[in-house]
Image (cartoon, helix red, strand yellow):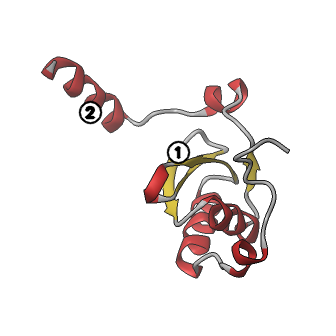
Amino acid sequence: MADGSDSTLTAEQTAEQAPNGLVSGIKSFAAGHGGAKAVIEYVGKRGARIVLVGEDGTWADQFADDTVVARQACAKAGVTVENAWERELMDQMRPSNDLWRSMARRTMAR
């Protein structure tokens, strides 16, 4: 296994449990959008970002303490975790009008 891989769990890592609020938030998103898939991104000291992509193209994110907790939360919520950003998953995402407006403001401000 490569150095830095998070697929090997130690006894200390498995002792952490996914918070119920995180699990219920993921379940709620999936139920409201016809199911969902997730991509987990390591974001340093902040922990891990769980990007949820609904079957209808809507997306949202949640934060967990680390990647292990993020994977546990997704498993408990019944959401499949993708190992990377595959083209099919990215094509499925539909940014909201609010997101487009905020991106335009950032570009105009430069």
Binning the other alpha carbons within 10 Å of mark 1 as few (below 14), some (14 to 19) or many (20 upward) gives: many
Residue sitting at x 63%, y 62%: 70
Residue sitting at x 67%, y 44%: 55
Q: Disc 2 residue type?
A: Ser
Left or right placement of residue 28 versus residue 44 in this view: right
Q: Which residue is mark 2?
A: 102
**Foreground: 28 or 80?**
80
The quadrant the C terminus occupies is top left
Q: How many marks?
A: 2
**Foreground: 68 or 82?**
68
* Spatial separation of the CA atoms under disc 2 and disc 1: 16 Å
Q: Quadrant of residue 56?
A: top right
State whether residue 100 is above or below residue 10. above
**Foreground: 107 or 48?**
48
Task: Please say if the residues under marks 2 and 1 sit with CB atoms less than 8 Å apart.
Answer: no
**Foreground: 5 or 110?**
5
Tag 1's secondary structure? strand
Residue sitting at x 57%, y 34%: 93
The mark nearer the N terminus, 2 or 1, is 1
The quadrant the N terminus occupies is top right
Relative image position of residue 81 (x, y in whole percent): 73, 50
Relative image position of residue 15 (x, y in whole percent): 71, 81
Q: Disc 1 residue type?
A: Trp
Relative image position of residue 20 (x, y in whole percent): 59, 81
Binning the other alpha carbons within 10 Å of mark 2 as few (below 14), some (14 to 19) or many (20 upward) gives: few
Q: Which residue is mark 1?
A: 59
